[in-house]
Image: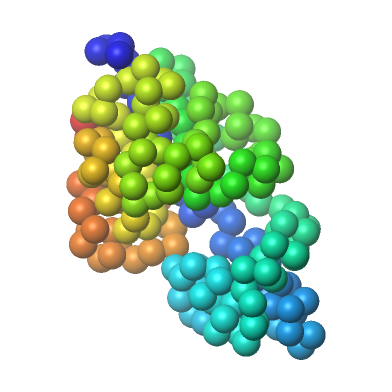
Amino acid sequence: MNAARQAALFDLDGVLLDSANQMRSTLAAVATCATGSRVMPGDLPADALRRPRCEVLALLDVADPDDACDRWWDGAASTTPVETFPGVLSGLLALRTQGTALGAVTLQDPDRVRWLLPEALSEHLEVVITRQDAPPKPAPDGLHLALGRLDVTPERAVFVGDSPSDMTAARAAGVVALGAVWGWHPPAALHAAGAHHLLPQPTSIGPSLLHHL
């Protein structure tokens, strides 16, 4: 491992990608296809983004959520574009400019990542670890795999996530756990899960992340 190099790792949805509207629209569209009844994003439970998608679909009377996702999820998701949060790209560029290694660890499938990631974001990431590359968070395996490919030791890395499982994975991996409060989970949940620090807004992404090391 390169003892001098530092790394910043990120979750994608709710941290780098403003995908909340896409997720709600996709859940509603899949439920509509599966039940034959019109389901709108406003019909979803208030905490839909904090629940597993199959659990949400079951609450919407989808009889077989796994089958429904296999049939309709990707088609529905691909119709709604996803953009990065304001300030994210400039923050990542600033990190890259000073030599910081950048990567993402996501619960998304690799095929979905290929069309989900905007090109302007993808070009900043040296490595993207998906759920098929390593056991998913809260297991630390994906973070360890990313750091291995980046040639960075855990004590020289931070991980920015927006869920309790992100914080658990970061702490288990031995990296600094930074909670993104603009994401899908409330600050109290991130703090309770062990976040070392909470970041207030997407423009917090930048060289200042490394001050927490």
- Image coordinates for residue 65, horizontal then vertical, percent: 62, 73
Name which residue lies at 25% across and 65% down. Answer: 188
Q: Nearer the viewer, residue 18 or 203?
A: 18
| Lateral position of residue 203 relative to residue 25, left or right | left
Q: Which of 28 and 140 is in front in this view?
A: 140
What is the quadrant of the N terminus in the image? top left
Query: Which of the 4 image quarters holds residue 175?
Result: top left
* Total numbered labels placed on residues in the image: 0
Judge whether 201 appears above or below 40 on screen.
above
Name which residue lies at 59% across and 47% down. Answer: 109
Judge whether 64 appears above or below 89 on screen.
below
| Lateral position of residue 169 relative to residue 16, left or right | left
Does residue 41 appear in the picture of this structure?
A: no
What is the quadrant of the C terminus in the image? top left
Name which residue lies at 38% across and 64% down. Answer: 185
- Image coordinates for residue 160, horizontal then vertical, percent: 36, 43
- Image coordinates for residue 15, horizontal then vertical, percent: 46, 49
